[in-house]
Image: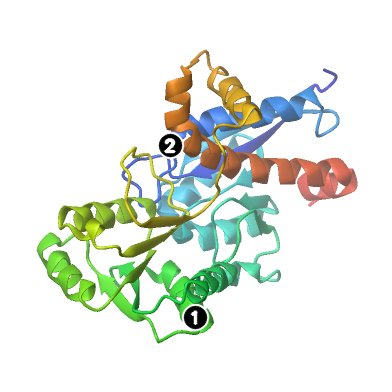
Amino acid sequence: MNATKEFKIALLGPWSRNSVKPVEKHYMEKAANYTIAKLNERCAIPGYRLTYSLHDTKCHPGVCIVEMAKARKSNARAFIGPACEFNCFSASKLSREWNMTMVSYACQSNLLSDRQRHPYFVRTVTTFLETGRFIGAVLDHFEWDKVCIVLNNALSYPWMELMDEIKRNYAGLQPTQWTTELSKPEKFSQELDAHMLKCFVFVLCMYTNEVIQFLANTKKRGYFETGRVYIAVDFLSYLNEDFTGLLDITLDANQDLEPFVNFFSEISCLDNDCITVEELHQRNITRTKVLKLCNDPVQLYSLCCEVDMDFFYIIHYIS
């Protein structure tokens, strides 16, 4: 390999399991190892060797800013992330001040599309606007009525954008809006019983841990045997438990295809942690999601640099 100079990117994400939208650090690290190794094999950025650092931003803007400062101090040249909507705006504004590119794999707010306010921000995920249109189309296609949109506590402001878009794009009866508090089990159970009497479809505008808590409590009360439908958006679960009636709007993959099995066998052995075929089948969906979270933004960024090296030098060495 001719590349001699290091080019570091910082991966920002909530690795802590107690975060509202956690991403398993072990999976993300393997995904990063795989992606970076493949890019370095083909010298994606001529004259440079890509490296990365992981930064746990939790779902807290203050922590995110501190971790970004640490990354910049350690000579990181670009940011991949963050994940939580709570962090997206402050992180994007900081990247603008530092003239550093930010490629997010999770920030979905429509407001981040404003190029004047967020000139260095791009993303590899859809916006709440587009997601709302899609969910509205799904509800209309199946002619579902008695729809309830659920948020966890009144502070879930990032999800309010999605809720508004679903309402705007759903041609059926006006959905019921339910703002609950999962942290208060007794109150939640009473509200759940009341909404089950009048709703058939529940759209969960929540983060992963909140979705798990909602579904677990709902299952405990016996509502999974009633034929109701639950729709979660990008539900990145690490549980093996099957939730009957859950529709997950996310990436899908056929685990039986030979390229799929070979691909994940290769990933599983990157850190001398080879696993059996049975274990592979248990983990493959989570691995697929996390790999896509990491791979897409890194590939996009490297492609921009590879196609337009003038852009690369202007962004990282002149400004």
**Farthest left residue in view:** 186
Residue wearing tag 2? 24
Disc 1 is placed on an element classified as loop
Task: Locate residue 77: give its quadrant.
Answer: top right
* Apparent side of residue 306 relative to residue 74 in the rendered image (left or right): right
Up/down of 304 relative to 40, above or below: below
Which is nearer the eye, 101 or 175? 175
Image spot of residue 294 (x, y percent): 59, 40
Q: Residues within 10 Å of mark 2 (few under 14, many from 20)?
A: some
Indicate whether 246 appears above or below 45: below
**Residue at the location (59% across, 42% down)?**
292
Instruction: Quadrant for the N terminus, please.
Output: top right
Q: Is residue 78 at all visible to an observer of this figure?
A: no
Q: Residue at x 65, y 65 (%)?
A: 118
1 vs 2, front mark: 1
Reply above or below: 192 against 39: below
Left or right: residue 180 compared with residue 140: left
Q: Amino acid at mark 2?
A: Glu
Q: Is residue 151 visible?
A: yes
Numbered label attached to residue 170: 1
Label 1 crowd (10 A; few <14 / some 14-19 / many >=20): many
Q: Residue at x 56, y 73 (%)?
A: 133
C-alpha distance separating marks 1 and 2? 34 Å
Above or below, comparing residue 92 to residue 238 in the picture: below
State the residue in front, 250 or 303. Answer: 250
| Circle 2 SS class | loop
- Coordinates of residue 28 in the picture (x, y in percent): 52, 34
Along the polypeptide, which appears first: circle 1 or circle 2? 2
Q: Quadrant of residue 159?
A: bottom left
